[in-house]
Amino acid sequence: MPHTVNVQKVTEENFPDISGRPVQTYRFEFRLGEHGPFIERFPVEGFEPNAARMRLEQRARDLELAGLK
């Protein structure tokens, strides 16, 4: 049975990109049922809530396929 993504906290932070340059990001801390917390980051610049929701849902599916039941 799929777990529901439950966002616990959203904060802003600087996080290094691939080149090591700090980028302002939204840090989403979420749980899947009783599992977690898990973290996903999204750049503040160009942030799209619907795209973020879809990415969190995909991450949940990936975690479930990896053995989270």
Image: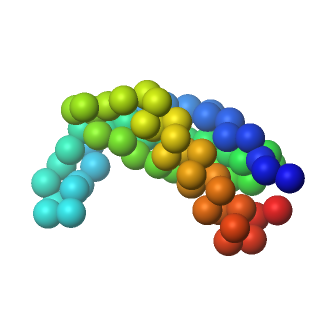
Q: Is residue 53 above or below residue 39?
A: above
Name the side, left or right, on which 12 lies relative to 30.
left
Q: Residue at x 52, y 41 (%)?
A: 54
Query: Which is more toward the observer, 37 or 18?
Result: 18
Q: Residue at x 52, y 36 (%)?
A: 53
Query: Which is more toward the observer, 42 or 14?
Result: 42
Q: Residue at x 72, y 47 (%)?
A: 32
Q: Residue at x 67, y 40 (%)?
A: 5
Q: Is residue 42 above or below residue 66?
A: above
Q: How is the image coloured?
A: rainbow
Outermost residue, right side: 1
Name the side, left or right, on which 19 lies relative to 37.
left
Residue 12 seen from this side: no
Q: Name which quarter of the figure residue 20 lies in.
A: bottom left
Q: Is residue 45 above or below residue 64?
A: above
Outermost residue, bottom side: 66
Q: Quadrant of the C terminus?
A: bottom right
Residue 60 seen from this side: yes
On the image, the x and y values in percent for residue 44 come to 28, 33
Q: How many marks?
A: 0
On the image, the x and y values in percent for residue 40 come to 47, 48
On the image, the x and y values in percent for residue 30 come to 61, 42
Name the side, left or right, on which 17 lies relative to 42.
left
Q: Is residue 69 above or below residue 40?
A: below
